Image (tube, grey):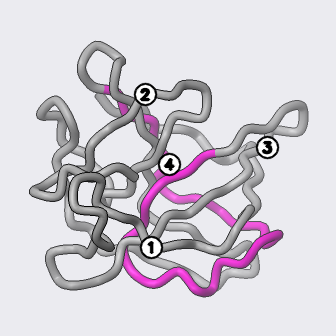
Amino acid sequence: MRFPIDTSKLGFTVTSPPTPAKDFATKKVKVTDDGQPVMVVKLLAMDGADSTMIKFNLAGEQHHLVPGMPVRVEGLAYGTAKDGEVRWWSATAVVPVNGNAAQVPATPRGSAGGEQAATAGARGRNPIGSARHSAAGESGGEG
């Protein structure tokens, strides 16, 4: 199941440079079906009273995202499968607040437990739990 998140009242800041995502099983760098690298993006999400770290994968180079940069997250969602045992964050794009867009191609990917992610396959770890998840498709990797 996928739960969309209203980000209109949230602030996001990049916490570290994006790094290449690795396939959980093979330990090789993940790429999309069309050969784009998959990058791990880590953000601090804030609502003015509290904050939490979120992490998810985005297809394509994300070199424009630098630590400390305020960004807007488009299509943010929290996904669950297998009765909540598998959890992940996803997004369709991360856009610097200054307006330079970092769009992700819209190629839906399946998720663990047979659920379909309605986003571009961006996945991450639940910041409040330690559940592991597998990436969609043939890689079976972790994001």
Vertical side of 85 occupied by 33: above or below: below
Q: How far apart are marks 4 and 1 (CA)?
A: 20 Å
Whether residue 67 appears in magenta in the rendering, the answer is: yes
Residue for badge 3: 46
Whether residue 112 appears in magenta in the rendering, the answer is: no
Query: Residue at (68%, 75%) from the top-left corner?
Result: 96
Residue 8 x, y percent position in the rendering: 68, 47
Query: Residue at (55%, 51%) from the top-left corner?
Result: 55
Residue for badge 1: 20
Do labels 3 and 1 touch, CB within 8 Å?
Answer: no
Residue 80 x, y percent position in the rendering: 34, 27
Q: Which residues are the magenta region? A: 54-80
Q: Which of marks 3 and 1 is nearer the N terminus?
A: 1
- Using the rendered view, name the quadrant where residue 36 is placed: bottom left
Circle 3 or circle 1, nearest the eye = 1
At numbered mark 4, what does the secondary structure look like: helix, strand or loop?
Answer: loop
Left or right, residue 16 beside residue 47: left
Q: Residues within 10 Å of mark 3 (few under 14, many from 20)?
A: some
- Using the rendered view, name the quadrant where residue 91 is placed: bottom left
Q: Which of marks 3 and 4 is nearer the N terminus?
A: 3
Residue for badge 4: 76
Q: How far apart are marks 2 and 1 (CA)?
A: 21 Å
Amino acid, disc 3: Met
Left or right, residue 70 beside residue 79: right
Q: Which of 25 and 16 is in front in this view?
A: 25
At numbered mark 1, what does the secondary structure look like: helix, strand or loop?
Answer: strand
Number of residue marks: 4
Q: Which of marks 2 and 3 is nearer the N terminus?
A: 3
Amino acid, disc 1: Pro
Q: Distance between the residues labelled 3 and 4?
A: 14 Å
Q: Nearer the viewer, residue 115 or 7?
A: 115
